[in-house]
Image (spheres, rainbow, N blue to C red):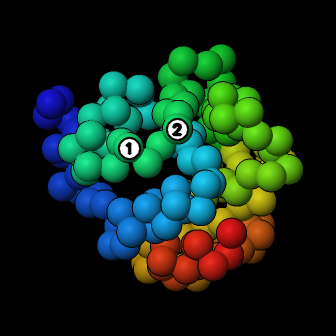
């Protein structure tokens, strides 16, 4: 595995409840993709090392597209690969640029900000703001 993946996971470990939430969504028949600004090999390394690769139907990397976030291209590409209308998609984000990207793709946006960023007024652009990813299945 790439050393950079270990550095990323050490700096930003997988959020609590992620595996349980992904399993619930899959059980409900919801298609799930990653729409990331990161390179594909890094995405693959992270989902593999965290043991969550099985939950994703597609990994979309903006590195392979003409534009990166906050442009909506990576979200639009992910929806196309899932064969799902953007009107039916939720963009789940923890960054302002990602939220803007999801909004620009005309998707409903769900933000799960870090506690230190909770009061940032820019989150008001999101359709939903959650304190914990465990709240996501009830929303969908």
Q: Report the front residue among 32 and 77.
A: 32
The residue singled out by tag 1 in the image is 54
Q: Report the front residue among 17 and 10.
A: 17
Residue at horizontal 26%, vertical 60%?
Answer: 13
Residue 35 locus on image (x, y percent): 56, 40
Residue 29 locus on image (x, y percent): 61, 55
Residue 83 locus on image (x, y percent): 74, 33
Please tell me how crowded label 2 is: few (under 14), some (14-19), or many (20+) other residues with Cα within 10 Å: some
Position of 131 relative to 82 (above/below):
below
Position of 29 relative to 56 (above/below):
below
The residue singled out by tag 2 in the image is 57
Label 2 element class? loop
Position of 134 relative to 109 (above/below):
below
**Residue 45 can be seen in this image:** yes
Position of 78 relative to 129 (above/below):
above
Question: Do residues under tags 2 and 1 come within 8 Å of each other at their CB atoms?
Answer: no
Q: Quadrant of the C terminus?
A: bottom right
Cα separation, mark 2 vs mark 1, equals 8 Å
Picture disc at residue 101: none
Task: Say left or right for 96 vs 39.
Answer: right
Please tell me how crowded label 1 is: few (under 14), some (14-19), or many (20+) other residues with Cα within 10 Å: few
Residue 70 locus on image (x, y percent): 67, 41
Residue at horizontal 59%, vertical 62%?
Answer: 28
Within the image, what quadrant is residue 115 found in?
bottom left
Within the image, what quadrant is residue 86 found in?
top right
Label 1 element class? helix
**Residue 122 can be seen in this image:** no
Residue at horizontal 15%, vertical 30%?
Answer: 1
């Amino acid at each position: 595995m790439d050393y950079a993946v270990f550095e990323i996971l050490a700096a930003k470990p997988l959020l609590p409840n992620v595996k349980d939430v992904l399993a619930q969504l899959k059980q409900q028949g919801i298609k799930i993709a990653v729409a990331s600004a990161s390179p594909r090999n890094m995405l693959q390394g992270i989902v593999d090392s965290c043991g969550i690769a099985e939950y994703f139907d597609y990994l979309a990397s903006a590195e392979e597209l003409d534009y990166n976030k906050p442009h909506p291209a990576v979200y639009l590409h992910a929806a196309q690969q899932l064969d799902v209308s953007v009107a039916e998609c939720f963009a789940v984000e923890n960054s302002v640029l990602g939220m803007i990207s999801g909004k620009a793709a005309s998707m409903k946006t769900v933000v799960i900000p870090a506690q230190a960023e909770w009061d940032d007024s820019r989150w008001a652009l999101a359709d939903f703001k959650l304190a914990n990813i465990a709240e996501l299945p009830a929303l969908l």
